[in-house]
Image: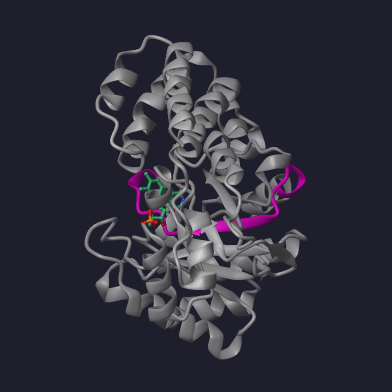
Amino acid sequence: MAGVYQIGSLQLDSNLLLAPIAGYCDLAFRLVVRRVTGYGGHGSVGLTCTDLLCPHAILRETDKTLWLAATSDDDQPLCMQLYGRQTDVLVEAARWAQQHGAKVIDLNMGCPVDKVTKKNGGSKLLTEPDLAVTIIRELVRAVRVPVTAKIRLGWCDGTIITQTLPPQLADAGVAAITVHGRTAEQKFRGQVNLPGVAQVVEAVKRHHPQVKVHGNGDVKSPQDAKRMIDATGCDGVMIGRGALGQPWLFRDTAYYLATGQLPPPYPQAERINCVLAHLDNLAHFRGQRIALNAIRQRISWYSPHLQPWPGLKRDVHAMPSVGEVRDYLLRQRDEQLQTV
Ligand SMILES: Cc1cc2nc3c(=O)[nH]c(=O)nc-3n(C[C@H](O)[C@H](O)[C@H](O)COP(=O)(O)O)c2cc1C
């Protein structure tokens, strides 16, 4: 049976979370992740998240942000992630998010991208702990749903915050903290620093054992997830890039964490069904042109996780319409079904 996992008052089916990845983990993809159910009753993904959302754009309800914040009944429970540094605007945006389907509100304190940090948002907040704590406290006051924070180990090696800011965020009322085990300056270079993640766990749990800590970074397999938990003592694991080509990774990982064994490989025909569902979702939500461009890009992520399929990427890139890509995938899927 799936171990029920709790963030604040919210019950989740597992302690595995899909990371926000701007431009990737949109509604079209989240629904693909959600369609892969657990194996042997051991759960799959527990929580998914939107891309980082600009609170000003939310309050103006721009078309782009409405798409980024779009959700549906099948996309739940969903976390909506906000970034910025203006407490009043963030509070209003959090209320909007709660009204529009967010079951968790997350504050981004990890984004190292210039566009975000130049406005002193994202990982720049790690250098302004008082402001970060104030924002969290006001968000917690403003909404009923749990408020969480996504952080890094610090801005740079000289300003590590693993033992200082996380317990302050817990004092301010966060229900969970996800820590990407790198500094902002590192961006995505080098390897994830598991002792750094362990320091956050230790610092938070000392006075706030109920606050969940999620380890994040470089988890690409069920074994990586177990290593993250074993090495850091974290409660759950957030997976980003590792899931882009294998949305069934949550199913495999939940089973592995529960039993110590890998489940039977997710069948090839089902893998192709995931790509088909992704294509259909993209076409449904974004239209044919965007769907075709997106699937051409996303097929490179899926390709290493499909059985050897000579010409897959070349063929998909050469096809002029969603309909042709769809027929091509369906033919392969049906061939697979006949061989099993
Ligand atoms: C292209 C890209 C976009 C990202 N967008 C976000 C984002 O919107 N919000 C956020 O908190 N983290 C974002 N991240 C960071 C991921 O959530 C995650 O922390 C990081 O990729 C490490 O986890 P992974 O190794 O499992 O991918 C992004 C990462 C990448 C590569």
Percent from the top left, x then y, of residue 10? 72, 64
User: Can you say whether 148 is above or below 73 in the image?
Assistant: below
Quadrant location of residue 189?
bottom left
- Residue drawn at x 28%, y 68% is 156
Quadrant location of residue 68?
top right
Question: Does residue 233 show up magenta in the picture?
Answer: no
Which quarter of the figure is the N terminus placed in? bottom right
Q: Is residue 264 left or right of residue 63?
A: left
Query: 228 or 35, which is in the foreground?
Result: 35
User: Can you say whether 117 is above or below 75 in the image?
Assistant: below
Percent from the top left, x then y, of residue 3? 65, 70
The span shown in magenta is 98-115
Percent from the top left, x then y, of residue 69? 61, 39
Please, which residue is most extreme toward the left here? 190
Query: 175 or 278, which is in the foreground?
Result: 278
Question: Does residue 103 show up magenta in the picture?
Answer: yes
- Residue drawn at x 42%, y 46% is 246
Q: Is residue 193 left or right of residue 76?
A: left
- Residue drawn at x 44%, y 75% is 229
The reply to whether residue 270 is in sight is: yes
Please, which residue is most extreme toward the top here? 320
Q: Is residue 143 left or right of residue 199?
A: right
User: Can you say whether 298 is above or below 236 in the image?
Assistant: above
User: Can you say whether 186 is above or below 210 in the image?
Assistant: above
The reply to whether residue 161 is in sight is: no
Percent from the top left, x then y, of residue 237? 48, 65
